[in-house]
Amino acid sequence: MTATQKPAEPVLSVRDLTVDFHGPDSVVHAVDGVSYDLHPGEVLAVVGESGCGKSVTSMAVMGLLPPTARIGGSVTLDGQELVGASERTWRSLRGRRLSMIFQEPMTSLNPVLTVGRQITEVLIHHQKLSKKDARARAIELLDLVGIPAPAERVDEYPHQLSGGMRQRVMIAIAVACDPAVLIADEPTTALDVTVQAGILDVLKSLRDRLGTAIVLITHDLGVVAETADRVLVMYAGRPVEQAPAEELFAHPSHPYTRGLLGAVLRPGSRTAEGRARLNEIPGLVPDLRKQPDACSFAPRCTFAQDDCRGGRPELRTLSGAHRIACHHPAGSAEPELMPVSASTSEEVSR
Ligand SMILES: Nc1ncnc2c1ncn2[C@@H]1O[C@H](COP(=O)(O)OP(=O)(O)OP(=O)(O)O)[C@@H](O)[C@H]1O
Ligand SMILES: [Mg+2]
């Protein structure tokens, strides 16, 4: 869906989300000021290095953080405020309006239950289907996510399936009740490139057929380029750049984003399967126990000046829907930083 087609009302709105984890001696500021809107049928990619708060942001949206987490800001689903909502409210929404494919699919499936049982449980709980109807629907869902011979597979256990098939089962469970919002946390990371393409096709077809809005967390720029309408780049718990995907790839403006995208033309930055990974930027991710009143990226930024170390840059509009938190963003387009999709990465690396 393009920005001009999108309906006026977002299905999910996140505003100034903060998540702090309170330990005995210190507080970890894991998420600090994340905001986004997600419209039906839209795909928002969330990117950033390990530990930058992608999963914690999503777990906050799902209401799945441990009691040590203090959550601030606002998360609204269909206009309903969820920060501070009761567990009963969350339970009525999770799996039904709001679903998540977790980062560790192999540990998310129950090894002692058949895949059919794991899907039918959701249908019986949320949609009050009879056992017979739930089983028929489970077979339909396995078919929908591209599992061959679904009527036989439905009675198999997770260990009888390949990694790609298990990931498809996870998707089938997540979308069993046609959720309005699906959060997919690194859904293709552990899979080889062909299986990855199949999983992305499943997600895209769900988006097209059911109008599901998708938050896609990924380290893979090919996936972002092929799938995302908009991109949120996070650094050390903070949003640093947000833009429509085409705009972000055409005019990456935050030095951090530009560093990450620098990977796409360097053959050495690809995985064995030829995927374009985010670039590794020299230096360390900061300690999240100390959120400075400065640009968090300044210690690693080759363009940092005194004002970067002396004041936190606010997220501001660069142009249109392109927002950035940087005192000295790059001004000009850099055509050499155009995205490389998984399918074209071979050509470029030659
Ligand atoms: N329960 C917790 N208690 C304390 N700190 C936590 C907890 N969960 C996560 N964190 C911290 O919050 C920060 C953000 O973690 P998060 O899992 O969101 O990273 P991520 O961006 O998803 O990384 P990755 O790409 O590795 O999955 C990390 O510093 C992590 O150690
Ligand atoms: Mg994560």
Image (spheres, helix red, strand yellow):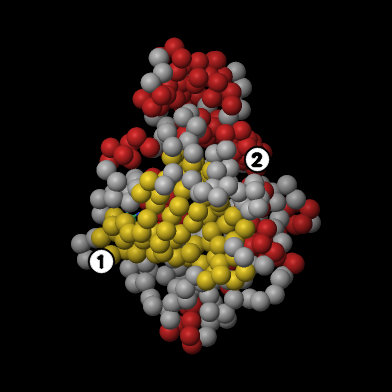
Residue under the image location 28 percent in, 57 percent down? 70
What element does badge 1 sit on?
loop
Q: Quadrant of residue 267?
A: bottom right
Residue under the image location 28 percent in, 41 percent down? 87
The reply, left or right, for residue 227 in relation to residue 25 is right
What element does badge 2 sit on?
helix
Q: Quadrant of residue 47?
A: bottom right
**Mark 2 = which residue?**
197
Q: Residues within 10 Å of mark 2 (few under 14, many from 20)?
A: some
**Mark 1 = which residue?**
26
Place of residue 342 in the rendered image (x, y in percent of width and height, measured from the top left):
69, 49
- CB within 8 Å, label 1 to label 2: no
Amino acid type shown at disc 2 = Ala
Q: For residue 25, say whether it is visible.
A: yes
Name the residue nearer the viewer: 52 or 20: 20
Q: Is residue 178 above or below residue 103?
A: above
Labels 1 and 2: the sequence-earlier one? 1
Residue under the image location 37 percent in, 72 percent down? 291
